[in-house]
């Protein structure tokens, strides 16, 4: 299990992280997980019809992983399980309806930050072929969340 997950095994939601770690060789590594094009059928939208009938949303997710030992060990157990990330996003996107993509993206980001103890996360949620009177390929929003210094201090980390 990656160090970042060993330190937070009881967390079940949200997360992203920005960290660089020196591995004793004078070189610092920074790992960013990037998932693109996760397609999930959901029930979000401004209109009652969107919420009742539903539609497909596409998600792009990026977050940094603190203390990713896989850069040295090449062990699957030392990195992030991409399927688990997809499950976290899918659960957040399907367990309730939101009127705005902004709120949905915020919730997804919070869950990823909590789960992976990251410093930052970027969530893009898009509606391909949205219900608009003009032809448009897609509409989307991108929400970026970062931990603040006050939060780091509360967690016992130095600024």
Image (spheres, rainbow, N blue to C red):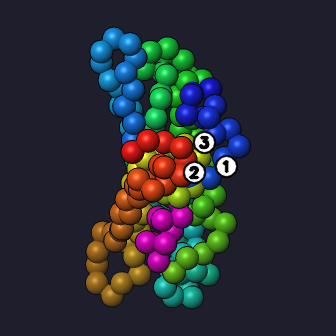
Residues in magenta, as a range: 100-108
Q: Does dot 2 land on a helix, a strand or a loop?
A: helix
Q: Quadrant of the C terminus?
A: top left
Predominant secondary structure in magenta? Answer: helix
- Residue lying at 44% horizontally and 41% vertically, measured from the top left: 158
| Residue 35 x, y percent position in the rendering | 43, 44
Using a 10 Å C-alpha cutoff, classify the residue at mark 3 as few (fewer than 14 neighbours), some (14 to 19) or many (20 or more). few
Residue 121 in sight = no
- Residue lying at 28% horizontally and 78% vertically, measured from the top left: 135
Q: Does dot 1 land on a helix, a strand or a loop?
A: loop
State the CA–CA distance, disc 3 to disc 1.
10 Å
| Residue 18 x, y percent position in the rendering | 39, 41
Q: Are marks 2 and 1 in contact (CB under 8 Å)?
A: yes
State the CA–CA distance, disc 2 to disc 1.
7 Å
Residue receiving disc 2: 114
- Compare residues 106 and 148 and report the one nearer the observer: 148
Residue receiving disc 3: 84
Q: Residue furthest right?
A: 10
Question: Which numbered mark, 3 or 1, is in the foreground of this view?
Answer: 1
Residue 142 in sight = yes
- N-terminal of the pair, mark 2 or mark 1, is 1
Examine the rendered structure and indicate whether residue 3 appears above or below residue 155: above
| Residue 46 x, y percent position in the rendering | 49, 85
- N-terminal of the pair, mark 3 or mark 1, is 1
Residue receiving disc 1: 12
- N-terminal of the pair, mark 2 or mark 3, is 3
- Compare residues 52 and 66 and report the one nearer the observer: 66
Horizontally, is 128 left or right of 87 in the view? left
- Compare residues 49 and 94 and report the one nearer the observer: 94
| Residue 63 x, y percent position in the rendering | 42, 45
């Amino acid at each position: 299990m990656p160090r970042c997950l060993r330190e937070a095994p009881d967390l079940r939601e949200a997360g992203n992280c920005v960290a660089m770690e020196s591995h004793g060789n004078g070189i610092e590594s920074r790992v960013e997980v990037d998932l693109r094009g996760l397609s999930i059928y959901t029930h979000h939208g401004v209109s009652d019809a969107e919420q009742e009938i539903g539609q497909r949303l596409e998600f792009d997710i990026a977050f940094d992983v603190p203390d990713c030992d896989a850069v040295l060990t090449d062990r699957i157990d030392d990195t992030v399980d991409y399927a688990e990330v997809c499950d976290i996003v899918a659960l957040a996107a399907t367990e309730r309806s939101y009127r705005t993509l902004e709120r949905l993206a915020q919730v997804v980001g919070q869950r990823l930050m909590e789960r992976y103890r990251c410093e930052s996360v970027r969530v893009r949620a898009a509606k391909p072929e949205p219900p608009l009177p003009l032809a448009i390929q897609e509409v989307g929003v991108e929400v970026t969340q970062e931990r603040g210094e006050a939060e780091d201090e509360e967690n016992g980390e130095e600024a």
